[in-house]
Image (cartoon, rainbow, N blue to C red):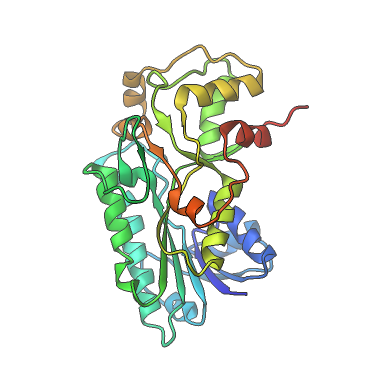
Amino acid sequence: MSKVWVTGGTGMVGRALVPALLKAGHTVTVLSRHPQQAAKVLPSACMVVAGDPMELGEWSKALCGHDAVIHLAGQNVADKRWTTEFKKTLEDSRIISTGNLTQAMLACDSPPRVFLGASAIGWYGDTGDEPVDESAPPSNDFFGSLCERWEQSSAPLQGKVRRVLVRTGVVLKAGQGALAKLDQPIRWGIGGPLAGGHFFMSWIHLDDLVRLFLWALENPNVSGPINATSPEPVRNGEMVRQIARRLKRPAFFPVPYFVLRLAVGEFARFLCASQRVLPNRALEGGFVFRYPSIASALDAEYPVV
């Protein structure tokens, strides 16, 4: 089994991935700016190293000797209203940290053999009803440019280590992330489709995302970009309807685009971008989704009582 170095280990994905790595027999080291807090939320079996991937430091020496690096760190896109300053934070937290990890890996006498870097389906921009896969070029908007530079930050590793770029869609898990934001107004009886609800959402259940990372780590034939999205994208209106049915609540209050724009600024345009992204490379490589449909994913999160 591998010795795996993880950044972003205390985030939503990291807190699910680290225990899964340990269960699979891997040894895990987590880089954290707040090691004491990290130790409280992560399994005791993993090692926590103090350091910030935004700055090269002593942590880079500790990275040497690991077999693989999984880079999840990055400012959450929904944390704040999108000001010019916050957009710069979004860029720096991804591009600078990835560049520093790349530099640290290449400085090792024997660099880690695998780099799994988080990316996003923001790469594709608004594709309308048109399905796209990993062969599609980046869009020419802010998110597309960010994802392109984010992925290019690890380009010096190409040909030296196996490099996988995981373009993640909307991650679903009850009480966390996007699903918490979608179901809360429905629980209050004031939920409904966003901006008409016609745009496609490309999503993935958190458990499948964790399994996909493990599959990519352990499968030596996997490299390059892979879409971490379910094979069945759904329109926003359908997702809202399915959530409401399981909560036994109405969802008759559509949220107009201008209200979203007032609430979250420029992020509204990306929040409502129609993205019908297909995980063709994962499917061709033999990965089997446990939750391929939105019904199966939501059934797992809203069990019948």
The answer to whether residue 221 is above or below residue 66 is above
The residue lying toward the viewer, choosing from 48 and 286, is 286
Residue name at image x 27 percent, y 48 percent = 138
Q: Is residue 92 above or below residue 106?
A: above
Residue 232 x %, y %: 50, 36
Q: Residue at x 38, y 76 (%)?
A: 104
- Residue at screen point 28% across, 50% down: 146
Q: Residue at x 36, y 31 (%)?
A: 274
Do we see residue 304 in this rendering?
Answer: yes
- The quadrant in which the N terminus is found is bottom right
**270 relative to 21 in the view: left or right:** left
The one of 90 and 300 positioned closer to us in this rendering: 300
Instruction: Give percent across and percent down for residue 176.
Output: 57, 40
The quadrant holding residue 25 is bottom right
- Measured from the top left, where is residue 182 in percent x and y? 52, 28
State whether residue 85 appears in this view.
Answer: no
Q: Residue furthest left?
A: 140
Does 112 sit above or below residue 305? below
Picture quarter with the C terminus: top right
Image-quadrant location for residue 183: top right
Q: Where is residue 7 drawn, in percent x and y?
A: 48, 63
Residue positioned most to the right = 305
Total marks in image = 0
